[in-house]
Image (cartoon, grey):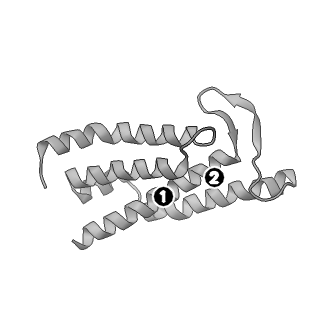
Amino acid sequence: MKSIILTTASRTLLPLLILFSVFVLLRGHYLPGGGFIGGLIASIAFILHAFANGLKKSRFLLRIHPGFLIPTGLLLALGSAIVPIIFEGLPMMTGVWYPETLPVIGKVGSALFFDTGVYFVVIGVCLTIIFTISEQA
């Protein structure tokens, strides 16, 4: 489908949806939201762009294969789960927090890194599925 309205809207909405997905990711370890919902929003942004501009342009815009995000996110989530065991001697998946507050993000802890890993996994899985289906059709 080639629609000038959809193409123009997708160019405008892509950066806004990515920004909103990062916002949802960063507020997730304090309030509702987090890696899963943020990853879905980012995936929807790229899927909308692919529908409007074609799969080739969306792949070029993403610059990496979405399948690469899956193991990267899994390693990040696993690393955040193991950090309390190695550095603090605490049980696995215990929240460990950096003592200082950062200006935009707030308190940084292992929950943020776990959510970021989930964010990457969700984006990778969703885009891999949709791009594969789009290539077959």
Q: Quadrant of residue 9?
A: top left
Q: Position of residue 110 (x, y in %)?
A: 70, 48
Query: What is the three-letter code of the residue carrying label 1?
Result: Val
The secondary structure type at the circle numbered 2 is helix
Q: Residue at x 77, y 45 (%)?
A: 96
Q: Is residue 69 left or right of residue 3?
A: right
Q: Is residue 127 left or right of residue 135?
A: right
Q: Which mark is residue 46?
A: none
Q: Position of residue 57 (x, y in %)?
A: 25, 53
Q: Residue at x 69, y 54 (%)?
A: 80
Q: Position of residue 71 (x, y in %)?
A: 55, 64
The residue that disc 2 covers is 114
Q: Is residue 36 left or right of residue 48?
A: right
Point out the tag, 1 or 2, that comes first from the N-terminus: 2
Distance Cα–Cα, label 1 vs label 2: 12 Å
The secondary structure type at the circle numbered 1 is helix
Query: Label 1: how many residues lie within 10 Å, few (<14), some (14-19) or many (20+)?
Result: many
Q: Quadrant of the N terminus?
A: bottom left
Q: Residue at x 79, y 53 (%)?
A: 84
Q: Position of residue 90 (x, y in %)?
A: 85, 54
The residue that disc 1 covers is 122
Query: What is the three-letter code of the residue carrying label 2?
Result: Phe
Q: Residue at x 75, y 38 (%)?
A: 98
Residue farthest toward the front in the current orientation of the protein: 32
